[in-house]
Image (cartoon, helix red, strand yellow):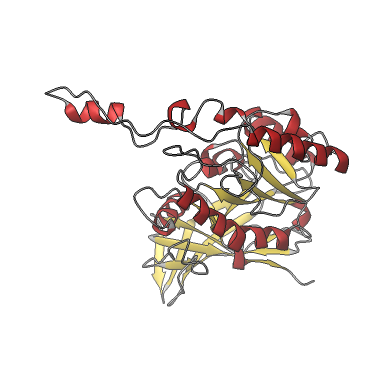
Amino acid sequence: MTQLRNGNVSFFCLVVILCSTLQAVPADEPPRVYQNRLKLLKNPKPLLADHPTFVQPIEEVRRYAAPILVDEEGADLSVRAWRFSYNARGIIEMPNRLRADKTAVIMVHPWGIDDGQGWRTPEPAGVCDFCTPTKNHLAAQHTRTVIDPFLKQMRPQVSLVMFSLIAPVDPIRKKLYRTFDYQPTEEERAEAKKQLKARLDSLPYKGEPLIETLTLSSDRPVIDYFRQFPGLMSGDQYNGKGFWNVPVPVTADVTVHKDDVLIFDQEGYAPLKKFLNKHGIRHILLTGYATDMCFCKTTAGYENLSKDFNVFLVGDATLATFPANSSPRYATNAHISFASINHLITQVSWIKKLEK
């Protein structure tokens, strides 16, 4: 039941019990009744408007302010966030007060590709990450401009900074980065860096040219055309044999601290959940790539993490893939908007240290 009075919309029937469906509330923390009263905002500024080169700002017809959602005792981190509700007919914003020592920042898939130290996109037609050198360079610019400064800002405050990469545990990256169960020495890191460079340099980064001759049937030529010439092929034909067998490092466009933790995707979600719980993590600030793919679907993606933690998607610290476009801004806007139906979205400028 809703009532409209002086521009205020109050949802009196909805009572949210924040014992969290994600994890049990400890016995000493009783559930709290959340009054889901929404106040219509007048002439609010667009959301995600700080970096329009990378993300098209979000504008809606209706925006509401809601009461504080996460309100943790001893909080020292302010994270304003928003979500979209079709039933509410608009965007709902709310403040949040978190404990930084219960918070982890995770960057999904910062692949070292076309960055001078990692993989190189195979020529003439190979694909990797954002799938062309030009698109990879644009994503790297976003990493340097938005994500790296954000990680530097948050690293002294939060409990953990983490990166996820593809493939299972390998002996090189195991000694190049801190992992769930090992902290390598400086000597081990230096040796692993040399070993990884040798492996990366061993690849020819060369595949076959585009297919020139196709065999088409008379009645279904379109089906035959795309079957033989799909829009994305990343196997040996175009990437060259062995490309995906060489470990990829964290991109050189982001600063890695010795205490930052590497997540191996192929180990699955359970070890990540266990590690986060071991360190008392309740909240996740999620960044990385790509908004429409790995950012949501992989081990450290929000579809997994949101089952067990309070997840905030940092909407301007991610980019979606952008086929058939020269810019990712509209694709990122769209995919963050879809995610906002059931997830909280924040932005770099909304994450601030609380002064006690």
Query: Residue 271: which quarter of the image?
Result: top right
Instruction: Using residue 192 as the reference point, say whether residue 211 is left or right of it.
Output: left
Q: Position of residue 206 (x, y in %)?
A: 49, 34
Q: Nearer the viewer, residue 23 or 57?
A: 57
Q: Dividing the image into 4 quarters, which one contains the N terminus? A: bottom left
Instruction: Using residue 315 as the reference point, say whether residue 180 is left or right of it.
Output: right
Q: Position of residue 12 (x, y in %)?
A: 48, 59
Q: Nearer the viewer, residue 140 or 119?
A: 119
Picture residue at 75% right of the left edge, 28% below the top: 171
Q: Most extreme residue toward the left, as rendered? A: 218
Is residue 240 depicted above or below 47 in this figure? above
Q: Position of residue 290 (x, y in %)?
A: 51, 46
Q: Position of residue 154 (x, y in %)?
A: 72, 60
Instruction: Using residue 23 as the reference point, say whether residue 189 is left or right of it.
Output: right
Query: Residue 85: which quarter of the image?
Result: bottom left
Picture residue at 41% right of the left edge, 50% below the top: 322
